[in-house]
Image (cartoon, helix red, strand yellow):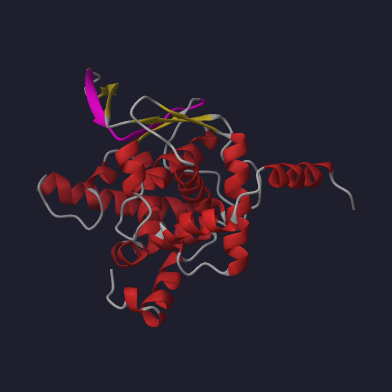
Amino acid sequence: MWSFRDWRRKRILARLAIEPALWQRALDSLPILDGLSQAETERLRERSLLFLHAKRLTALPGVELQLTDRLRLAAQAQLPLLHLADLDWYQGFHEIVIYPDDFHSPQKHRDSAGVVHEWDGEHSGEAWLQGPVILAWPGVRESGSWEGYNLVIHELAHKLDMLNGDANGLPPLHSSMRLEDWATAMQSAYDALNATLDADPEAHTEIDPYAAETPAEFFAVTSEYFFSAPDLLHRTYPKVYKQLQAFYRQDPFTRLQGLQKSHPDYAEPH
């Protein structure tokens, strides 16, 4: 059956066609895409091009974005959505602004006594409700490996979280998921991380202690680890991993295990 949406999609993809070698160059620079099937890689290519068509990437002075850079960013943005229905998950914003370095932005926090604290915080990324995503170029360039860091996925996880309103660590769950299971897994892990840091603010934690800031940051950080260090997240917070696996409908840990068994570059575990 003819569909205007499919027709328009094909028209856009035809207009944005890129050389296969260029797409392969982007893939080769992103180890976290290793192990995807041919069908998954092709779907990722199409969705990445559509993402670049829908979102404006604004590079501030000091940042030069080549087409390969744009493809790398788009591929990482689309990886979390790879097995989700095409439902405009990144609605509510139209622009990604890329700063040449980390930046300062005003912060505000009301403590338990009702006192409001304000300060300027240094950030490598921000996502605003109904506003743009801001990324620092060094963080973008450092993203894409299996090292437990991915600025692109982290900030876009905030955008998924905001689909229900203000970021609170609860994105719109699928009908097959239970809110109680999500809340129990996330809250218990979040509380455990905070208890560790309350006892010793300098304590070593398996995941970035920034995850203890708020439930929203916990969701963003664990989403980041889900795709960039799935073995570590699976070992540290298996119930959190299971909930993210159900939400993203992917299993990067199993994909990484397959690479460790079959590829010499992955012989050593993370």
In terms of secondary structure, what is the magenta stretch mainly? Answer: strand
The foreground one among 249 and 51 is 51
Where residue 222 sits: x, y (%)?
36, 52
Q: Position of residue 236 (x, y in %)?
A: 28, 63
Instruction: Please name the residue shown 53% across and 53% down the image.
Output: 22
For the point 46% across and 53% down, the residue is 182
In the image, is residue 30 above or below residue 268? above
Q: How many marks?
A: 0
Please say if 145 is above or below 208: below
Furthest-bottom residue in this view: 261
Work out whether residue 178 can be spotted.
Answer: no
Residue 61 x, y percent position in the rendering: 36, 24
Give the image quarter of residue 228: bottom left
Q: Is residue 127 left or right of residue 100?
A: right
Picture quarter with the C terminus: bottom left
37 w.r.t. 47: above or below: below
**Is residue 209 in view from this perspective?**
yes
Q: Which residues are magenta?
A: 117-130
- Identity of the residue drawn at 46% across and 61% down: 33
Q: Looking at the image, which is closer to me, 78 or 233? A: 78
Instruction: Indicate the position of residue 15 as horizontal and vertical percent values.
Output: 70, 42
**Towards the viewer: 180 or 7:** 7
Q: Is residue 44 left or right of residue 220?
A: right
Residue drawn at (49%, 35%) of the image? 162
User: Which quadrant of the view contains residue 52?
Assistant: top right
Q: Is residue 240 magenta?
A: no
